[in-house]
Amino acid sequence: MTVHNLYIFDRNGSCLYYNEWNRKKQAGISKEEEFKLMYGMLFSIRSFVSKMSPLDMKEGFLSFQTSRYRLHYYETPSGLRFVMNTDLSVSNARETLQHIYSNLYVEYIVKNPVCDSTHSLDSELFSSRLDAFIRALPYYSPRAA
């Protein structure tokens, strides 16, 4: 069980934060291009799910999986998008993403007058607390296959 990486996007699709822990394979493109592709895919999947759902989608798109990983998605009311890729053994990381938003992002970015949350998140305190939180998760393993 492991966490591969985490993206935080603003409402306009700009990647505010990215970190990886156990990513085995690189995309072979620049990080900026990867961020654009990831956001575009999320936008398309979210749109598709909302149009195809027979019921009103209160929570919307939560996750999807491939044969190799599971992508977990959480969108805040303000339009921030948190995306975490894990291995297949992690069935639901919604509470984890909500915790990252409410207990780490809000505390160390939003409430910090020095941080500009409209651009790249360069807070060492946020990064270190996030890293410690991810490494303490029950499904985090530094030696995942």
Image (cartoon, grey):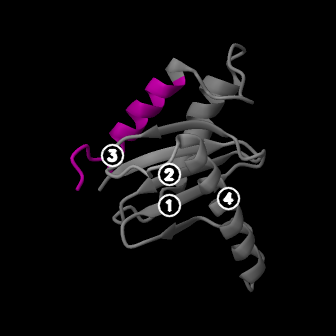
- Element class at badge 1: strand
The answer to if 144 sits in the magenta stretch is yes
> Whole-Å distance between the Cαs marked 2 and 4?
16 Å
- Mark 3 or mark 2, which is nearer the start of the sequence? 3
- Position in image of residue 74 (x %, y %): 62, 54
Q: Is residue 123 left or right of residue 28?
A: right
Q: Amino acid at mark 4?
A: Gly
* SS for dot 3: loop
Where is residue 101 drawn, in percent x and y? 61, 40
Residue on which disc 3 sits: 22
- At horizontal 38% and vertical 61% (from top left) the residue drawn is 90
Q: Nearer the viewer, mark 2 or mark 3?
A: 3
- Identified at 34% across, 38% down, the residue is 135
Q: Disc 4 vs disc 1: which is toward the camera?
A: 4
x then y, percent, for residue 88: 36, 66
Residue carrying label 2: 84
Could you tell which of marks 1 and 2 lies nearer the N-terminus?
A: 1
